[in-house]
Image: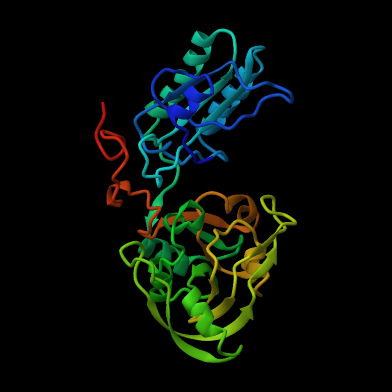
Amino acid sequence: MKSSTSGRFCRSCGGRLGSPRCECKPRGPAGATPANGLAYARRPMLEEVNGGRTDIGPMLDRLASARAYEAEPDVFAVSVYGGFASADIAEVGPTVLVTGRGDFDAHQAFAETIAEDIWQRRHEVLNDYMDVAVAAALAAAYAADRGPLIIADYADNPGGGGYGDSTSLLKALLDAGVTGACFGPMVDGEAAAILHRSEVGDRIRIALGGKTDARFGGGPLDLDAEIVGLSNGGFVGDGPMIGGLPGNFGPSAVLRAAGIEILVVTISQQMLDLQQFRAFGIAPAAKRVVALKSMQHFRVAFAPIAGEIIVCDSGALCTPHYEQLPYRNVPRPIFPLDEIA
């Protein structure tokens, strides 16, 4: 999980601070009173190098160690979080919290062990954050005999604070001549309103996306497209994350431009359920290429239909190239903005 918790919060809960870092989520046994104390540890970095990803990689062993330590009689909960590099705050970064009582020297030592492992493995990047042109070239050549190629735009994830209207990946796919594809969501309420003044089957020329801040992911695309769907934006999830829960993108439309179906929405949300495409007449499993805006949460729903998954950086607000972001409040020095021995 991506989040950060301040030392002030931990002190207010009776916490002891070792190295000044932490993230927490109470996870103790039913009836456990607020902890006698909190052991808190972190390191000088913006986030765990893989954003706290827990489907593969070193976080699996860290969480297993945390669960094992929770079996100790005086431990109520151990929380290990990956941090959130998009948060421009003073106490940013991956953190470890032990909630318990008794031997706090042992609790602090355990928290420090996990925090130090996160620090020592800070160069072990699991994702290959491709340039959009590289991702588009792979998509153009992709043979979907094992299922579609899923391209996740990590940098324009609305769930992480991205605007959802970056156009650089869509432009690259169009420039590469990719067909049999879908793309979504493109968060552009102005375009959605214009499209709702037309009819399904109409062709329209429209400036799509890129209206919030063109510095982060590109400016508007001038598209000649066919309207293939109009909707009020409602859907009901059927996947592991939001199964049975209603959601709404607001006034929405589906455009077809040069072999790519584009879901245009009003309300910003990341893609994490197949119904976020299917409810609008888009069948992702039948596509050669599925391009979506999400960092991690898409995997549980989309991996089962995927032949391959790649991750790209569109240069939007959640880019992993943190040196491109206008931080004002994070402490310095901090990894990876600064070299730290």
Q: Quadrant of the N terminus?
A: top right
Horizontal side of 238 relative to 203 (left or right) equals: right
Q: Residue at 36% x, 34% y: name it.
A: 45
Task: Give the image location of residue 155, x and y in percent.
Answer: 42, 55
Task: Give the image location of residue 313, x and y in percent.
Answer: 39, 56
Which residue is at the front of the view, 302 or 318? 318
Task: Give the image location of residue 245, x and y in percent.
Answer: 72, 57
* Residue 54 sits in quarter: top right
Q: How is the image coloured?
A: rainbow
* Residue 167 sits in quarter: bottom left
Q: Quadrant of the C terminus?
A: top left
Which residue is at the front of the view, 179 or 316? 316
Horizontal side of 303 relative to 335 (left or right) equals: right
In the rendered view, tell whether residue 228 sits above or below residue 185: below
Question: Total marks drawn?
Answer: 0
Horizontal side of 30 relative to 110 (left or right) equals: right
In the rendered view, tell whether residue 56 sits above or below residue 68: below
Which residue is at the front of the view, 182 or 191? 191
In the rendered view, tell whether residue 335 sits above or below residue 260: above
Task: Give the image location of residue 131, x and y in percent.
Answer: 36, 58
Q: Residue at 39% x, 37% y: name it.
A: 92
Q: Residue at 49% x, 68% y: name it.
A: 187
